[in-house]
Amino acid sequence: MQNAVTEAPQPQRPRLTMQEVIPPMAPATQQAVAAQNSFLKKSEETFKSRQLGSQYYVAQAKRKFNEEQLDSAMVYFNRAWLLDRNNAEVYWGYGLVYGQQQAYDKALYILYRALDKDKTNPRLLTDIATTHLSRFYKYSTVDDLQQSKKLLEQALKHTPENAADVYYKLAINSYYLYEFGTAWEYLHRSIRHDQSKEDQTFISALLEQEKDPEGIYVAQSKQ
């Protein structure tokens, strides 16, 4: 693991619009408009409401996402959005797909739209924080690291079911911010919640910087 925050000049990120992030928002041809209208009419005949139809397509999109079929997931999220533009799960889903595609600017743009509709969801807060952390890995942008930590701390206030994951990511944030004692504290909390968080690579990296204050892990002596 790298153990330094790079403060090199960062590339300019584009100013995005909803049209650039949500594929079906601006159909380019009359044929595309007609296809959308036909889809909406058929969906209204199939489902009791557009909201129920949107929920159905979100479920299908999640299934495809979990199967790592990102293109298919995006198609279903597009259908869900057409049926209900107020469905926060659609925006959340777009963000997860873009995140997997490493299109972090688009991912964060749309994930924050989801957060506007669901401000205290700990899992959503964690996903946004994770996306910031991923963008930090790519660009070494300190702002991403600090925002990730802020969002993870917010997630903890809402007692997330996935506390082990939140603590683990807070440990990583603290490590890159040179707060090694805090990193150890969060790591131990994470492992106490979930033993699978005992990441030997991360533990070794932390030991190179500071001894484990609880004395559970020790550096291997070099031959």
Image (spheres, helix red, strand yellow):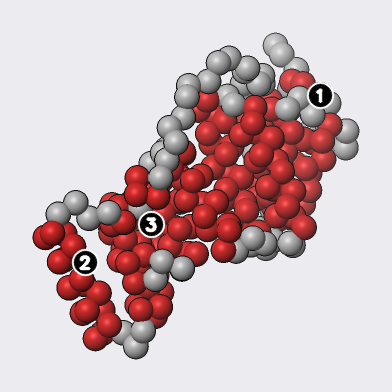
Which residue of the protein is positioned furthest toward the left in this rendering?
Answer: 31
**How far across and how far down the image is residue 41, in percent?**
22, 79
Residue 42 badge: none
Amino acid type at mark 3: Phe
Q: Going by the picture, which residue comes out furthest to the front?
A: 30
Foreground label between 3 and 1? 3
Hey, which quadrant is residue 17 in on the image? top left
Of residue 218 and residue 147, the one placed in the foreground of this image is: 147
Location of the C terminus (image quadrant)? top right
Q: Position of residue 152 (x, y in %)?
A: 69, 48
For label 2, the crowd category at 10 Å Cα-Cα, with few meaning under 14, some 14 to 19 and many 20 or more, is some
Residue at mark 2 to residue at mark 1: CA–CA distance? 58 Å
Q: Using the image, determine if residue 63 lies above or below residue 46.
A: above
Residue under the image location 66 percent in, 39 percent down: 147
Q: Residue at x 41, y 74 (%)?
A: 55
**First in sequence: mark 3 or mark 2?**
2
Q: Dot 3, crowdedness within 10 Å: few (<14), some or many (≥20)?
A: many
Q: Which residue is mark 3?
A: 65
Q: Which residue is pictured at 13% across the width and 59% down the height?
A: 30
Q: In this figure, which residue is indicated by the disc labeled 2?
A: 36
User: Which residue is under mark 1?
Assistant: 210
Whether 3 is drawn above or below 95: the answer is: above
- Residue at (77%, 35%) from the top-left corner? 183
Q: Secondary structure at mark 3?
A: helix
Q: Amino acid at mark 1?
A: Glu
